[in-house]
Image: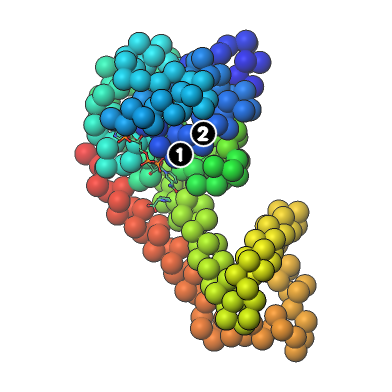
Amino acid sequence: MFRQQGGIRLKAVFVGAGSMAEAIIAGALKSGALQADHTYVTNKANDARLRQLAEEFGVQAGYEAGAALQDADIIVLAMKPKDAEAGLESIRSFIHEKSVVISLLAGVSIDFMEETIGKPCAIIRSMPNTSAAVGKSATAIALNQFVTDKQHKSALHLFSAIGTAITVDEAQMDAVTAVSGSGPAYFYYIAEAIQQAGEELGLDHETAKELLIQTLLGAASMLSKNDGQAAALRKAITSPGGTTEAALRTFDEFRVKQAIAAGVKEAAVQSKRLGDAYIH
Ligand SMILES: NC(=O)C1=CN([C@@H]2O[C@H](COP(=O)(O)OP(=O)(O)OC[C@H]3O[C@@H](n4cnc5c(N)ncnc54)[C@H](OP(=O)(O)O)[C@@H]3O)[C@@H](O)[C@H]2O)C=CC1
Ligand SMILES: O=C(O)[C@@H]1CCC=N1
């Protein structure tokens, strides 16, 4: 924990107070990665939202972020990508040599952030996913040249409070976004199809839902326990001439595997397209 790293209590400012900021704040306070009295949250204009976060988590919240930013070890950019430029402009004069900017913004390049800030500054670009809300995000981070080992460790520790965290080269961020950023949505899409088929086969909504959720949880645990050996696990269920084989044969006829792979690759292309809008 940060507190154990030389007894330092890191000061963090969240610029943006939406669902992703809340998930990180909740996880980081629970794990001890951050402390409420050293955490400041601000947003654009939604005062009621700030009061709600202050009440729920005991963090400081408001529109007088200057002093907190000046003092911050970590500045988390948690607005939507379209607000990136305004957000960066609002913090640039407060950034100092010991602070690190951690961006959650999908598609916004480190180059764009460096140029908008306009001075040497440690920047970490991250891609978490919405499972952060239940502490199960798969987060990847990429660093610029100014990030120190200590800041790198602190960021991994922060993201570990909302799931797992790994470090990649920034060039891999489009692929990461396609696999794990958008990834939960693919499984929800498959879940919708199974739920619908279950109901069409005569199960009531609740029964189909319970069976589906537990089946997904079980499959995720099996994958985790068996080192991601999806093909081997699938084969172990598929009896010759049995029901699974019938389902998989039908999926193959519809080229479902190829369709999913093409969709994931298209997500990466779209990530790059969106990112190109954030190059100076
Ligand atoms: N959803 C996902 O699956 C993933 C999202 N992300 C990224 O996380 C980021 C946050 O997403 P999410 O939490 O869903 O967003 P939300 O829309 O829930 O929240 C955005 C927040 O940013 C604030 N804001 C807007 N402009 C500014 C500004 N100039 N200065 C300060 N605050 C500002 C808004 O304030 P106000 O309410 O007052 O307007 C609001 O609090 C995005 O960049 C997204 O790309 C990353 C990975 C996955
Ligand atoms: O769909 C999107 O563009 C964002 C990025 C990853 C998840 N949601």
Q: Residues within 10 Å of mark 1 (few under 14, many from 20)?
A: some
- Tags 2 and 1 touching, CB below 8 Å: yes
Secondary structure found at label 2 = helix
Is ligand 1 less than 8 Å from the beta carbon at label 2? no
Is ligand 1 less than 8 Å from the beta carbon at label 1? yes
Q: Residue at x 63, y 73 (%)?
A: 204
Q: Quadrant of the N terminus?
A: top right
Foreground of the two, 203 or 109 = 203
Q: Which mark is residue 24?
A: 2
Q: Residue at x 41, y 11 (%)?
A: 71
Q: Residue at x 35, y 46 (%)?
A: 107
Q: Which residue is mark 1?
A: 20
* Residue 67: quadrant of the picture: top left
- Is 240 above or below relative to 277? below
| Residue 108 percent location from the top left of the image | 33, 41
* Residue 32: quadrant of the picture: top right
Q: Is residue 220 visible?
A: yes
Foreground of the two, 151 or 194 = 194
| Residue 79 percent location from the top left of the image | 34, 36
Q: Is residue 156 visible?
A: no
Q: Residues within 10 Å of mark 2 (few under 14, many from 20)?
A: many
Residues at marks 2 and 1, CA–CA distance in whole angstroms = 6 Å
Secondary structure found at label 1 = helix
Q: Residue at x 48, y 34 (%)?
A: 22
Foreground of the two, 153 or 219 = 219
Q: Amino acid at mark 1?
A: Met
Q: Which mark is residue 176?
A: none
